[in-house]
Image (cartoon, grey):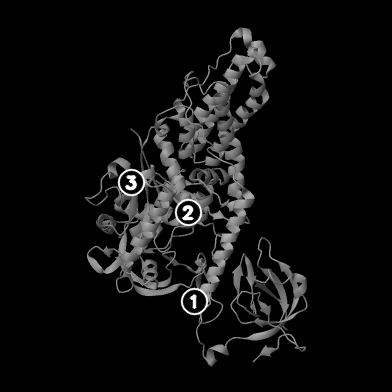
């Protein structure tokens, strides 16, 4: 039997589960289920990357030991995957890999030893000891070259990471290096001989361009005195392994490489790696170079997907306030609604937009009004017109004329040909990981059968005895199409398709039915339907969005209250606060917010400032224009709902009542400081 091994990245255990974790893991789960249907024996890995300075620091911030911290984060991730039907109990991943596991220590040290003994393609030692001096991003777990960080504007400021915008660490210490610079030609040869090794094409071109620009040797260790939370370098316990040599190795140690606890390396390897574009370089350059040095077979391929961004195309950020929260997704949408959305709405490999409203719209249009409606109307009519028993789909020749009058084809061949074509296109698309295109092909059949039902008008056919066989044919063709769709769409929507399959009166596990083997007519006449239930009820968009908005506002209020600590301040601290007179020039409501107003305020500076304040429930914009207000002018700017607020308007807070703006009884010049 053919085997298929798919991996997500192992997620860095410095933060709690978020949408990015869910997205990649859904795709891997879909691929596993699809390949299993096609007759492959499958293995699916996900898990957590648990070492490094960032983990060490995160643990310290939370007053935990590193192991205690990673145990907590891994537990939360496993819990989240279970809730979304992605864990082993629900037929999802086969292993939740953790790099703090003992067998991984054993395996990655074996990989190191092999690489340390090796010569590069240019005859040099693959690993050597040297001295490193440079800038390091703990969040990226990467050393940064000059074009990979934001240069400081002030003399004593630190450069910042382009990705995380956090200050970099200056590292100057002894280190082991992997001689990556000697592997440029070997890597380019790999990309040339295996064009599909990196996908999509645009990402492949980026990697090739980067390698051609010249590779630098890679620091692969840190002194234990600097980073104690890591795997010791073999035969030199004064060093711990740099996180990427450790982390990437998990894909093989999890299946038995270099250790005696796990098995299956010869069976499962090589794997297809699904990764975000931010870690493509590590998987497409570092990882194959490590394996070349250790003389281990290279991966089957690396597929780099894009980011999920908001409806305006902005990266998700808690600072902006545009994140998609997993508890909200769980509350309002079924797992299959979410799976369908990310597969259909997002072209895999590109960035994709997501928002609560867009999930509702896609669910209602494609699922409630599409597949769900086809299932519901078909099965309800069989229950009503044929006592819940699937009729014969044949029309006798003498009744062809009646079928023609009802706009129904006398035989099913036209539908069968269209269905077989859509099935073949669907399979071809899923083979290429073009999930959106494959689902579009499937929905063309739903539209065709929906039209057949609407044109035939079964509710009219039931009134004419001459149209008995015509009605039977319409109902049978709809049911048989549903059977095919259940099998085809199972990898995308395993829960819903199994429910519809059972409602058709069919038993068995569709996870092992190969869609390529489907034959028209295998649905038997006389099959008794199961209990009919709506699989995709229509979502009340207005009600759901109102509840979500209310929940978001309450959460924001709670966070603001947490920040308002009642503590005494010294005079020295107080005089640091600049209170200045400002005149409100313009005021308007912030879109999609019941509480926020957005102001432009003249503080006597070269140009007015933009300031947001939660006053919309108590002051109209017209009332505020022209007022002189007290502004905290040296408050650090912050983003609210994507808009920058460059200060704070002062108001008195009255228990149980409205806030009262602090203003003046006499004329005061704009910009005057309060003392």
Tell which circle, 3 or 2, labels the residue nearer the N-terminal end. Answer: 2
Residue depicted at x 42% and y 57%: 282
Q: Badges 3 and 2: C-beta atoms under 8 Å apart?
A: no
Is 345 situated left or right of 58 in this image?
Answer: right
> Where is residue 236, by image quadrant?
bottom left
Q: Is residue 635 visible?
A: yes
Q: Residue 518 or 652: which is nearer the viewer? A: 652
Nearer mark to the viewer, of 2 and 1: 2
Measuring from the top left, give residue 193's x and y in whole percent: 43, 43
Residue 456 visible somewhere in the drawing: no
| Secondary structure at numbered mark 2 | strand
The quarter of the picture where the N terminus appears is top left
**What's the residue at 64%, 71% (across, down)?**
614
CA gap between label 3 and label 2 equals: 23 Å
Instruction: Answer above or below: position of 385 versus 439.
Output: above
Cα distance in 3D space between marks 2 and 1: 27 Å
Question: Residue 622 in the image: x percent, y percent?
Answer: 78, 71
Q: Nearer the viewer, mark 3 or mark 2?
A: 2
Question: Residue 580's quadrant in the figure?
Answer: bottom right
Which mark's residue is nearer the viewer, 1 or 3?
A: 1
Q: Which residue is mark 3?
A: 297
Q: Label 1, on which residue?
A: 158
Callout 1 crowding tier (Cα within 10 Å): few <14, some 14–19, many ≥20? some
Residue nearest the viewer, comparing 206 with 140: 140
**Which residue lies most toward the front here?**
656
């Amino acid at each position: 039997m053919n085997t298929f091994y798919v991996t997500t990245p192992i997620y860095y255990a410095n933060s709690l589960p978020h949408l990015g974790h869910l997205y990649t893991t859904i795709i891997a789960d879909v691929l596993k289920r699809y390949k299993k249907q096609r007759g492959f024996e499958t293995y699916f890995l996900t898990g957590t990357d648990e070492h490094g300075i960032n983990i060490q620091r995160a643990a310290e911030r939370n007053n935990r030991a590193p192991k205690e911290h990673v145990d907590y984060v891994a537990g939360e991730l496993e819990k989240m995957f279970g809730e979304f039907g992605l864990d082993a109990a629900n037929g999802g991943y086969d292993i939740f890999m953790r790099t703090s596991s003992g067998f991984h220590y054993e395996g990655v040290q074996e990989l190191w030893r092999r690489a340390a003994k090796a010569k590069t393609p240019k005859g040099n030692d693959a690993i050597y000891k040297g001295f490193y001096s440079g800038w390091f991003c703990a969040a990226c777990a990467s050393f940064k070259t000059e074009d990979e960080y934001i240069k400081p504007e002030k003399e004593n400021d630190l450069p910042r990471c382009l990705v995380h915008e956090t200050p970099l660490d200056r590292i100057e210490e002894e280190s082991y290096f992997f001689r990556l610079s000697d592997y440029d030609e070997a890597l380019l040869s790999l990309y040339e001989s295996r064009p599909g090794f990196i996908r999509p094409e645009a990402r492949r071109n980026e990697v090739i361009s980067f390698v051609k620009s010249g590779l630098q040797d890679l620091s692969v260790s840190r002194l234990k005195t600097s980073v104690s939370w890591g795997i010791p370098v073999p035969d030199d316990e004064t060093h711990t392994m740099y996180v990427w040599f450790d982390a990437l190795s998990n894909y093989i140690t999890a299946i038995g490489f270099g250790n005696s606890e796990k098995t299956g390396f010869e069976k499962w390897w090589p794997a297809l790696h699904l990764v975000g574009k931010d870690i493509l370089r590590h998987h497409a350059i570092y990882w194959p170079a490590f394996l070349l040095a250790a003389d281990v077979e290279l991966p089957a391929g690396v597929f780099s997907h894009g980011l999920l961004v908001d409806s305006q195309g902005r990266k998700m950020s808690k600072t902006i306030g545009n994140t998609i929260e997993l508890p909200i997704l769980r509350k309002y949408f079924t797992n299959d609604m979410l799976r369908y959305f990310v597969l259909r709405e997002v072209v895999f490999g590109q960035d994709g937009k997501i928002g609560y409203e867009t999930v509702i719209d896609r669910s209602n249009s494609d699922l409630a009004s599409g597949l769900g409606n086809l299932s519901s109307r078909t099965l309800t009519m069989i229950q009503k017109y044929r006592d819940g028993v699937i009729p014969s789909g044949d029309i006798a020749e003498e009744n062809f004329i009646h079928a023609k009058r009802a706009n129904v084809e006398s035989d099913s061949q036209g539908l069968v040909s269209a269905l077989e074509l859509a099935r073949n296109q669907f399979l071809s698309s899923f083979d290429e990981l073009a999930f959106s295109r494959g689902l579009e092909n499937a929905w063309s059949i739903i539209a065709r059968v929906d039209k057949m039902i609407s044109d035939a008008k079964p509710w009219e056919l039931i009134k004419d005895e001459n149209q008995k066989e015509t009605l039977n044919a319409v109902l049978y063709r709809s049911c048989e199409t549903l059977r095919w769709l259940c099998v085809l769409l199972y990898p995308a929507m395993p829960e819903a398709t199994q429910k519809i399959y059972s409602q058709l009166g069919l038993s068995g596990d569709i996870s092992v039915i190969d869609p390529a083997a489907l034959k028209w007519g295998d649905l038997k006449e006389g099959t008794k339907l199961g209990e009919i239930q709506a699989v995709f009820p229509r979502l009340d968009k207005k009600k759901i969005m109102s509840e979500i908005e209310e929940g978001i506002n309450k959460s924001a209020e709670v966070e603001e209250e947490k920040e308002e600590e009642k503590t005494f301040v010294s005079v020295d601290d107080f005089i640091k606060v600049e209170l200045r007179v400002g005149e409100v020039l313009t005021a308007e409501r912030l879109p999609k917010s019941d509480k926020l107003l957005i102001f432009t305020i003249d503080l006597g500076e070269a140009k007015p400032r933009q300031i947001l304040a939660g006053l919309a429930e108590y002051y109209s914009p017209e009332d505020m224009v022209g007022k002189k207000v007290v502004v905290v002018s040296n408050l650090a700017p912050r983003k609210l709902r994507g808009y920058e607020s460059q200060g704070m308007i002062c108001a008195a807070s009255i228990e149980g009542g409205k806030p009262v703006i602090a203003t003046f009884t006499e004329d005061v010049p704009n910009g005057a400081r309060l003392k």
